[in-house]
Amino acid sequence: MNRHVINPADKAKLTAELRAMGRKAREAARVLGRMPAGQKAQALRSAARAVRVAEAAILEANALDCAEAAAEGQNAAFLDRLLLNAQRIEAIAASIEDIAALPDPVGAVTEEWMRPNGLRIARVRTPLGVIGVIFESRPNVTADAGALCLKAGNAVILRTGSGALRSAIAIHAAMVAGLKAEGVPEAAIQLVQVGDREAVGQMLTGLDGAIDVIVPRGGKSLVARVQAEARVPVFAHLDGNNHVYVHAAADLAMAKDVLLNSKLRRTGVCGSAETLLVDGACAATHLAPLVKALLDAGCAVRGDDAVQAVDPRVTPASEADWGTEFLDAIIAAKVVDGLEDAVRHIEQHGSHHTDAIITADAAAAAQFLAEVDSAIVLHNASTQFADGGEFGFGAEIGIATGRMHARGPVGVEQLTSFKYRVVGEGTVRP
């Protein structure tokens, strides 16, 4: 299977197929928008069971994807994101069940009030409609995105990177079988089954008005393309250039634990820390132990002059390193002149994704949490908590770093809009 390109002569055929998917998704969205909450939840539970039953087929498909990725020389972080095993498939199924168990957002009244003229006004959650999700080689996103969109009453068209296409097809087939068994339209969750990048461009046009919003989940180049070319609204999801700032009042043992977890628990996820900032006021006691802990754990450290001076294994940091999402066992490290200098560095080089402060000083923590303009800010906690499941959302489509509509983990509530329901008694406006 050639997953990377299609014959240019087939472009018209691909266009027709994608537009047909868009029409089917729009029809499915109308059904889902009025589907009872219980039926959606039962369908998701059925999809979870189907994923478990299809474990062997999913693992077989994933083995082919992983073998090809290894042959292409993909790095360890890429391979880790791509790899599935029995435990990860169980986690995928369990995540679908977690989403099924969430309160249904559709129809929820978020606020209501009475006007002096007797009008009763309520703000009510409604589905967005049809969502296009474009993601790179993370097979679990197939299930997470599909389940979240359906729970929120939306149809979804998924397009994964070519490196995970076989795995995504296998997961998608299982999910659809589970949904159909409960009377949910097959077009509720659709997957583009070619790896050609032309499909991305087609989706970004909106498929003749079928797609209401695009959610990209991937690296900087993917998100940049989506933001540049999309003709429909986009939930911005920039790279996770995340910082751990060790404040002057940080407990060293805590700082070490949080830093190692933030960087090395999983290096290939968007919540991984990419830069360590150490306050100059505690550098004499904290810097060397923190740098040594990283190096001894197998993490390369690229530092400024002060960081290089504490361990000969540290290599010089380039200016580009401060803005790089390594997604690997590499971290940039710098000594900063206090909290305000740390905030300035994060504002200049960060991606407004996730940033953490380690300190016992409540006032310093409060200032950091207020002044760092990121979707997620943490005090004395690992950046790897940047995850919708850890927020109690069941799962997430991604971490939105924009400021409109959705910010932070995009879960079921963020996949809804609202309308105003106004009730009168023959009320007319004078």
Image (cartoon, helix red, strand yellow):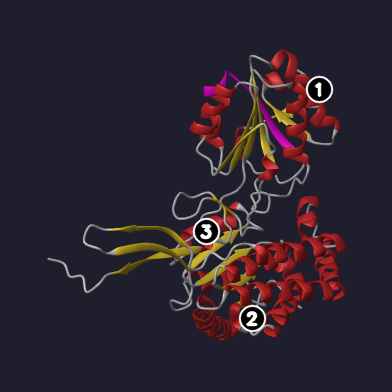
Give the CA separation, mark 2 to mark 1.
53 Å
Where does the image place residue 115, in percent across and percent down from the top left? 26, 58
Mark 3 vs mark 1: in front? 3
Q: Which residue is mark 2?
A: 7
Secondary structure of the residue carrying tag 3 is helix
Q: Earlier in the sequence, mark 2 or mark 1?
A: 2
Task: Determine crowd level at label 3: few under 14, some 14-19, many 20+ residues with C-alpha closer than 10 A.
Answer: many
Going from the N terminus, do you reach mark 3 or mark 2 first? Answer: 2
Above or below residue 230? Residue 327 is: above
Residue under label 3: 414
Give the vertical position of 161 relative to 5 (above or below): above
- Do we see residue 191 in this rendering? no
Does the magenta segment cover residue 335? yes
- At horizontal 65% and vertical 24% (from top left) the residue drawn is 359
How many residues crowd mark 2 within 10 Å: few (<14), some (14–19), many (20+)?
Answer: few
Image quarter hosting the N terminus: bottom right
Residue 161 lies, in percent from the top left, at: 67, 66
Residue topped by disc 1 = 312
Residue at the (47%, 72%) spot, across then down = 205
- Kindly indicate the quadrant of the structure image that contains residue 55: bottom right
Amino acid at dot 1: Pro
Which residues are drawn in magenta?
330-340
- Please name the predominant secondary structure of the magenta segment in the image: strand
Decide if residue 231 is on the left or right side of residue 167.
left
Q: Amino acid at mark 2?
A: Asn
Q: Nearer the viewer's eye, disc 3 or disc 2?
A: 3
**Does dot 2 land on a helix, a strand or a loop?**
loop
